[in-house]
Image (cartoon, helix red, strand yellow):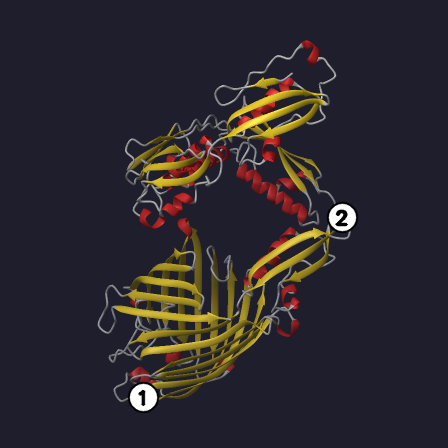
Amino acid sequence: MGCRIRKSIGISLVLLLLSIGICSGSEEVIHKITILGNMKVEEGVIRGAVKSREGGPFSADQVREDLRSIFGLGYFSDVQVDIKTTPKGREIIFIVMEKPAIKEILITGNQKVKLDDIKEKVTLTTRSILNLEKVKENGEQIRRVYFSKGYYGVKVEHKIDYLETNEAVVTFQIEEGVKGHIKKIVFKGNKNIKSSELKKIMLTKQRNIFSIITKTGILDEDILKNDIQMLAAYSIDHGYLDVKIPEPKIDLQDPKKIQIEIEITEGPQYRFGEIDFKGDVLTTKEDLFGSIKIKRNAIYSTSVIRKDINSLTEKFANQGYANVEVTPATSTDEKNLLVHLTFEIEKKRQVSFEKIQIVGNTKTRDKVIRRELRVAEEELYSATGLSKSKDRLKRTGFFKEVELTTSRGSTEEKTNLEIKVEEAPTGAISFGIGYSSIENVVGSASISDRNLFGLGYYGLLKFRLGSETRDLRFSFTDPYFLGYNFAGGIDLYSENRELDTYSYKILGGGIRFGKELTEKIRTDAIYKLEKIKVSDVSLDASRFIKEQEGEKVTSALSFSLSMDTRNDYYNPTRGARHSISLQNAGGILGGDNYFVKGSVETSWFFPLPLKTVLNLRGKVGFVEPYGGREVPIYEKFFIGGLHTLRGFEYGMAGPYDENKEPLGAKKMVSFQSELIFPLSQEIGLKGAIFWDVGKGFDKFKDITPLKTGVGVGIRWFSPFGPIHLDFGINPNPKPGEKGKVFDFTAGTVY
């Protein structure tokens, strides 16, 4: 006796009733399951939807479910079932009629969006089985492509042409419409958090004057959905635990100027109630309270909780408890609007470092890396020590990347540390070109290596050559002199200048010693001895220059103190570097020149939105003679140029004589501000806008008016090395001053 189930439209669901005798007989075992009619769909795909099993019990209800599951695959326009009785049991035969296969996918109407951009999002493929739901999904994906490019009035329709060969052609018809932008984002219901604050949280932005560059003002629905989650998290972080933000309303009546309305129900603001600790307390609860920022009755904040968890974790980890777990347990008092917080602490076992392994250092010696570490084998685990070690390794400038990972040692009380580094090119060959009214073109070149022989030595050989300039300098520094924790170095140099009214030559050398006082602060001492000869003084030279003629010796000792908190050696985006130095020449040191020279320098980096960085730099300096001597011209400050005041030539932002010859200044002040912004992140190209103010002067009454330079520049860490280009403008040039000055330096690394 055969049973047959049919679905008149799409699926056959009519089961023939089985007789009571058959249903209760011994034949209620499935002998065989057969699939018929499938041409393109694999049989295994169909069988995967069937839960009835050969050799298992027969169930009419299960067969009906299997029928529905097969049809639910979406590949068939009709599914039938035959159930036969055999001597060995029931045979179930599923007969399927496949939907058409997709022969071709056509996209029409696209003119403003590239076909490749659309095809990238289309998941339909030719020769696959036609599925109407997937066709609709792909139409929606095409619409999203247009939305992401600002075409908010786009309409996407689909058409299916069925062929006699049981194939189909799918056509997506696009009506693009006009390109638009987000004109306005409106918040409603936010009584306590300002709309301006909420807009800063969102990645979705209104169109503004910078949108051409920043590409803001475009609606991306996925990004907007994420923005809603971020707004909710921000509200909770400010104590509004019951905040509700429904799906935003998008007004597309005018596709060129759309408006987004976000409604917020803040609810009441909660505060912290009881704060407590539970579990392992190392010393006392009072000690732990000193490590957290949360205070009773303060506004509830999830970010503060996270920071305090990190503080507690670090406190325990610094005492060897590397695997400590700190879990915040909260309970809400809705009546009094309080959140009671308990930090549950499980310190686990104390851990010490077993092995420290260094990998990836193809050039740098192990000992150079190990001397920068603030952790050691057999010492207790320290989170702060690891952080400082990573920071110190990055600040050497020897490595592109530094990664510290820990793994279980031979026992639970031991941990192994792997330090993985990627060597950076520390050698550099650089050259530069500058222009001045004195020499027209001045070229410079240098070869240096911050990690000479992989031993951390610093070596430099530099020369500067122009029609009237010949300089040569050699420097060598050992940051751990003779293995001790202080630096030592030497300098040898020769400087020659042939100016319009005089010439001078300096032959000298110096020795340097320095030591780190803390992780960020160091001090240095330098002694230099120079022999200076001023000659070829012309008859029309100024009286001051004539007084400099002859040979003199400078014996000077200087001390400096510096602090560096920058976050990156190559490309700082935050932090600062400050220094103060004082130099004495003559007196008990001997020599012919007696003077005191001092300077203070500072440089700050501030990260701004859109990956821009603001750099503010300032310097003040003075030099004063004593013992009845005069300040040598070559020890004065020559303001103007790349490092002091752009838009001015070397020395021309200070005193000069009647021959327009820079005389140098006894005092100086300069302030440089620079906004650095990305032009192409792919190739590391950046632009800069700068504004410099400063002056060189001899008396304080001459400090005003200050001189100003403005301009633009290019910063590019190219495949050939760093390139630095500045075009400075003097907006108010005086007689003898140029209106425009160009500075350029470039180099390569190895």
Residue 70 visible from this viewpoint: yes
Q: Is residue 488 above or below residue 418?
A: below
Image quadrant where one finds the N terminus = top right
Residue 194 position within the rendered picture, expressed as x and y whole percent measured from the top left: 39, 34
Q: CA distance from mark 1 to mark 2?
A: 79 Å
On the image, the x and y values in percent for residue 149 come to 35, 43
Q: Is residue 131 left or right of residue 345?
A: left
**Disc 2: which residue:** 412
Q: Position of residue 442 (x, y in %)?
A: 35, 78
Structural crowding at the residue carrying mark 2, measured as other residues with C-alpha within 10 Å and reported as few (<14), some (14–19) or many (≥20):
few
From the viewer's perspective, tell me whether residue 569 is left or right of residue 414. left
- Counting labels gives 2
* Amino acid found under the numbered disc labelled 1: Val
Residue at the location (47% across, 80% down)?
473
| Badge nearest the viewer, 1 or 2 | 2
For disc 1, the neighbor class at 10 Å (few under 14, some 14 to 19, many from 20) is many
Disc 2 on helix, strand or loop?
A: loop
| Rendered position, 564 above or below 665 | above
**Sequence-earlier tag: 1 or 2:** 2
Q: Nearer the viewer, residue 46 or 690?
A: 46
Determine which residue is flagged by label 1: 537
Which corner quadrant of the image does residue 161 belong to? top left
701 or 720: which is nearer to us? Answer: 720
Identify which residue is drawn at 47% across, 66% down.
Answer: 580
Q: Secondary structure at mark 1?
A: loop
Residue shown at the point (54%, 23%) measured from the top left: 336
Residue 420 lies left or right of residue 415; in this view the side is left
Q: Amino acid at mark 2?
A: Glu
